[in-house]
Amino acid sequence: MLGKFKGIDVSMLSALAEPNRMAIVELLRDGPLTVGEIANRLEMSQPHASKHLKVLSNNGIVEVKPEANRRFYKLRLESFRAIEYWATSFQKDMEKRFDNLDDYVQELQNKRKRDE
């Protein structure tokens, strides 16, 4: 069962795990594109690109902005802020563990010097 962890929806991570969808996200980093532009750049059919864009949209990763007869897809930065916040929480935990390891190594070195 997929759920939420610290503000991040696990289904969003699942949507990003598919290689074609990740390639679309990478393309959209440079700015909005139409489904046709995405399909051409990734050398896939337009229906195939549309299918992946629908999954990304349903999971809050991209949004659609209609202009005249075209639809532009762009990244929703809020989703990536949530991922960044979540990932950063691991960084803080790891830094704390490394600090504890440094303290332990220093303690061992000091003990070794005293025993010499």
Image: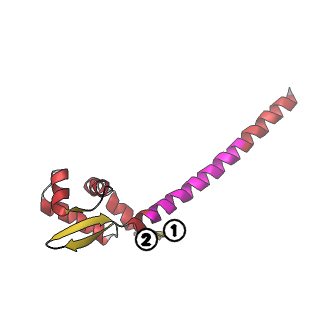
Mark nearest the camera among 1 and 2 is: 1
The region drawn magenta spans 81-102
Q: Is residue 97 magenta?
A: yes
- The residue type indicated by label 2 comes to Gly
Q: Which residue appears farthest toward the front when viewing the image? A: 68
**Position of residue 84 in the picture relative to residue 23 (left or right):** right
**Position of residue 22 in the picture relative to residue 67 (left or right):** right
Query: How crowded is the residue under tag 2: few (<14 C-alpha within 10 Å), some, or many (20+)?
Result: few
Which residue is located at x 77 percent, y 34 percent?
Answer: 109
Q: Nearer the viewer, residue 52 or 75?
A: 75
Which residue is located at x 62 percent, y 50 percent?
Answer: 95
The residue under label 2 is 3
Q: How is the image coloured?
A: secondary structure
Q: Quadrant of residue 9?
A: bottom left
- The residue type indicated by label 1 comes to Lys
Q: Position of residue 39 (x, y in %)?
A: 17, 56
Q: Quadrant of residue 10?
A: bottom left
Find the distance from the CA under tag 1 to the CA under tag 2: 10 Å
Q: Nearer the viewer, residue 64 or 4?
A: 64
Which residue is located at x 12 percent, y 57 percent?
Answer: 45
Label 1, secondary structure: give it.
Answer: loop
Q: How many marks?
A: 2
Label 2, secondary structure: give it.
Answer: loop
Which residue is located at x 50 percent, y 57 percent?
Answer: 87
Query: How crowded is the residue under tag 1: few (<14 C-alpha within 10 Å), some, or many (20+)?
Result: few
**Quadrant housing the N terminus:** bottom left
Q: Position of residue 49 (x, y in %)?
A: 18, 60
Q: Quadrant of residue 70?
A: bottom left
**Position of residue 17 in the picture relative to residue 95 (left or right):** left
Q: Position of residue 6 (x, y in %)?
A: 51, 68
The residue under label 1 is 6
